[in-house]
Image (cartoon, rainbow, N blue to C red):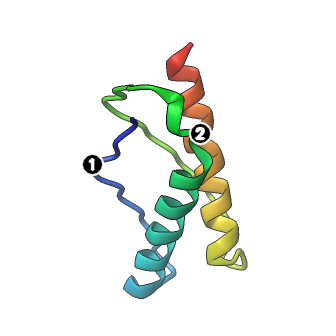
Amino acid sequence: MIQIDELQIRMPDNNKNDGNELGRQVAERLANAIPEDYGNQHIPELNIRWQGAASHSISQMADHIVEQILQEIKNAKL
């Protein structure tokens, strides 16, 4: 099991509802992307930065964030 206790997303050009929707989409996509038999893993800290254009949709931002999280999880498991 991989557990994320807190996910902070800073979106200076967007409103709180956009941030909530982005967090929801990231959590949902991440839950679907990690296999159930992945095992237990503790990652004390995970920092992801993305300087995306304001024209990116919430869905595109969620995809990018999930890709980065999965890559960091994979790197931590090695």
Q: Quadrant of residue 20?
A: bottom left
CB within 8 Å, label 1 to label 2: no
Q: Which residue position is annotated with label 1? A: 5
- Front position in the image: 52 or 67: 67
Neighbours of disc 2 within 10 Å: few (<14), some (14-19), many (20+): some
SS label for mark 2: helix
Task: Quarter of the image for the C terminus: give it.
Answer: top right
Query: What residue occupies the far top of the structure in this picture?
Result: 78
Numbered tag placed on residue 31 in the rendering: none
Task: Quarter of the image for the N terminus: give it.
Answer: top left
Q: Amino acid at mark 1?
A: Asp
Side (left or right) of 30 relative to 41: right
> Mark 1 or mark 2, which has the lower sequence index?
1
The vertical placement of 26 against 43, above or below, is below
* Residue 59 image offset from top left, x and y in percent: 66, 73
- Front position in the image: 77 or 47: 77
* Residue 19 image offset from top left, x and y in percent: 44, 76
Q: Which residue position is annotated with label 2? A: 70
User: Residue at the spot x=62%, y=58% of the render?
Assistant: 51
Side (left or right) of 75 relative to 56: left
* Residue 69 image offset from top left, x and y in percent: 55, 42
Q: Amino acid at mark 2?
A: Leu
**Any part of residue 12 in sight:** yes
